[in-house]
């Protein structure tokens, strides 16, 4: 029988997966994997069944390695930035508004 992962181990896995998801150079992939990670971990947040937690943890560890490899490949073939990604200059007041 497998050991139930601790809360700290799940939080570490969550932060590692978020960090790996933010490693994509493509905006769409990056946003997708960040959003998917947050929703996946939110669904299991209140789970108490040790078997489900162990299965979840093992699946996410495998998924983390896939995300890391995919982010590396994506950074090798990343294209130009999208318009939404460019930093916008600070808004300046053109009138005498205060």
Image (spheres, rainbow, N blue to C red):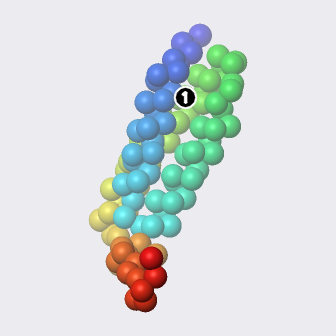
**Residue 47, x across and y down, in percent:** 69, 25
The foreground one among 52 and 93 is 93
x 56%, y 15%: residue: 4
Is 13 drawn above or below residue 22 in the view shown?
Answer: above
**Residue 96, x across and y down, in percent:** 42, 86
Q: In which quarter of the image is the N terminus?
A: top right
Callout 1 secondary element: helix
Residue 72 is drawn in which quadrant? bottom left
Q: Quadrant of the C terminus?
A: bottom left
x 35%, y 60%: residue: 73
Is 71 drawn above or below residue 55 in the view shown?
Answer: below
> From this viewpoint, which residue is outermost toward the bottom?
95
x 52%, y 21%: residue: 7
57 lies left or right of 95: right
Q: How crowded is mark 1: few (under 14 residues within 10 Å), some or many (20 or more)?
A: some
Q: Can residue 83 be seen in this view?
A: no
90 lies left or right of 59: left
The foreground one among 98 and 37 is 98
**Residue 86, x across and y down, in percent:** 37, 76
Residue 40 is drawn in which quadrant? top right
The foreground one among 43 and 98 is 98
Is 80 drawn above or below residue 49 in the view shown?
Answer: below
x 44%, y 51%: residue: 21
Is 59 drawn above or below residue 66 in the view shown?
Answer: above
> From this viewpoint, which residue is outermost toward the top?
1
Q: Can residue 26 be seen in this view?
A: yes
**Residue 24, x across and y down, in percent:** 39, 59
Residue behind mark 1: 57
């Amino acid at each position: 029988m497998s050991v139930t992962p601790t809360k700290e181990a799940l939080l570490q896995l969550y932060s590692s997966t978020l960090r790996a998801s933010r490693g994509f150079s493509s905006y769409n992939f990056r946003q997708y994997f960040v959003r998917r990670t947050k929703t996946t971990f939110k669904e299991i947040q209140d789970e108490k069944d040790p078997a489900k937690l162990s299965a979840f943890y093992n699946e996410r560890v495998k998924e983390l390695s896939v995300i890391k490899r995919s982010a590396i490949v994506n950074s090798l073939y990343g294209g130009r930035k999208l318009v939404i990604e460019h930093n916008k200059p600070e808004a300046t007041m053109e009138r005498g508004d205060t």
